[in-house]
Image (spheres, grey):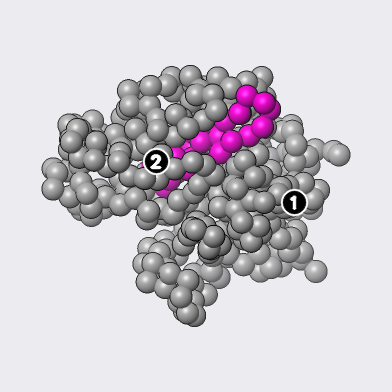
Amino acid sequence: MDMQWCVGLMTGTVLDGNIDVALLRTDGEGVAEFGPHALYPYDEDTRAILPRCLSAALDWNFDGPEPAIFAVAEERITRAQSAAVARLVAEAGLAMSDIAAVGFHGQTVLHRAPVGGRPGRTRQLGDGALMAQLLGVRVVHDFRNADMAAGGQGAPLSAIYHGALLDSLGGGTGTAILNLGGVANVTARDGAGGLVAFDTGPANAPINDFVRNRGLGEMDRDGQLAAAGRVDAARLRQALGHPYLTKSYPKSLDRFDFGHDWAAPLSDADGAATLTAFTAAAVGRGLDLLPVRPVRLIVCGGGRRNPTLLKMLETFAEVTVETAEAVGWEGDATEAQCFAYLAMRRLRNLPGSFPSTTGAAAPTLAGRIATAA
C-alpha cells in the first residue's frame, strides 16, 4: 500500500494545556517520513476546564451518569483540536484532501485497569464524529475501548509504533523505548521478535502535582527543584515496596494511581528529588521484568526535558539513556505520531494492540472510524 499522510493528536494526562499534533507519512507498517509537528496551546477557558474534569471523573469513578462537565469539555476539546489539525496541515502546505485520516486520541480523564476478572474501563473526552464533520476527513477515535472489551489493559497503545521505530534502528533487545508522560511506559523486543510493553510506574504527574500543590508553578522545569534537593532514601525504599512494581505485565496505570502525598513531610526540593528518584527507580524495576533487560533506553515524551530525571534514570535504573533526538526522532511528536500511525493501521484493518502489549485475548483493532458524510 502507498504511504499516505495522516495526522495524529495527543493531549497527555499531565495537563500542560497544550495540543500535540503531528503529520506522519506511513502505510501503518513502515514510516516513510516524519512531517511537521507543533504544540498549540488551548485557549484559557478550555485549559481551565480540564482539571475540573479530572476532579469530577475521580468523584464519578464510572458510577452513575457521567458528570455534566464532560459534555461541555468534550465539545471544547474537539473544536480546539480540529482547529489545530487544520492549522498544521495548512502550515505544512497541504490540503485536508491530502490527509488519509486523523488519529484523535482525546483527553483521558479516567482509566481503570482490569482487576480480578473485572473488565477495565476508560474514558477519553473527544467527539470523533464532530471532528470528521469539521475537517471533512476520516477520523479514527476511541482507541482503547475495544482492547478493554477484549480483556486488555487499554494501554499502552504506543507499542506497535515504538516497535516500528525500534526496527528502524535495526531491532534487537539491547534497546528499549521509554515514554515519560503522566505515567511512564516501556516498549521492548522480547528476544523472539515479539513486542512487550507496559506502564512501569509514574512519570511526570506526581512531580507536577507536588510542585503545583506547593504553589511553585506547573512543573519542576528542567528538574531544577529536584536537582537542589536530596533523595530521602528511607521514603524511597518504602515507596518501592508498592506491589504494582513487581506485578507481571501486561499492566497499566491511571495518572492518579501513584500520588505525591507520601512526600508531603519533605521540603520542596527534597520532595521533588525523592519523587523524581521514585519515577527513575520504578523504571528500573520495570526493566527487571523484561525477558531481556535492555542496556539502553531511548526516551521520548515531556520527561526527556528533565535532565535531573534522565540522570537519575542512569543511576537508579542502571541503564544508558539517550533522548529521541539523539537517534533522529522527534521527541515532542512521538505520541502524536503514534496516533497517526494507529489511524492508518485502522484504515487497513491491522491490529493496534496485542496480547503481549495490553493483555487482550487476541490482536485487536484500535479505534472506530468516523466519516465526514
Labelled disc at residue 346? 1
How many residues crowd mark 2 within 10 Å: few (<14), some (14–19), many (20+)? many
**On-image quarter of the N terminus:** top right
Q: Which element is circle 1 on?
A: helix
Name the residue nearer the viewer: 288 or 84: 288
| Magenta segment includes 190 | yes
Q: Image height check: is 323 above or below 85?
A: above
Q: Which element is circle 2 on?
A: helix
Magenta part mainly helix, strand or loop?
strand
Q: Image height check: is 97 above or below 310?
A: below
Report how many numbered discs are placed on residues in the image. Answer: 2
* Highlighted magenta segment, given as a residue range: 177-203
Name the residue that disc number 2 marks.
245
**On-image quarter of the C terminus:** bottom right
Name the residue nearer the viewer: 351 or 152: 152
Q: Is residue 8 visible?
A: no
Q: Amino acid at mark 2?
A: Leu
In the image: residue 213, left or right of residue 195: left
In the image: residue 294, left or right of residue 367: left
Specify the quadrant of the image occupied by residue 126.
Answer: bottom right
Specify the quadrant of the image occupied by residue 229.
Answer: top left
Residue drawn at x 50%, y 47% is 251
Disc with the residue nearer the chain's start (1 vs 2): 2
Residue drawn at x 63%, y 24% is 191
Specify the quadrant of the image occupied by residue 320.
Answer: top left
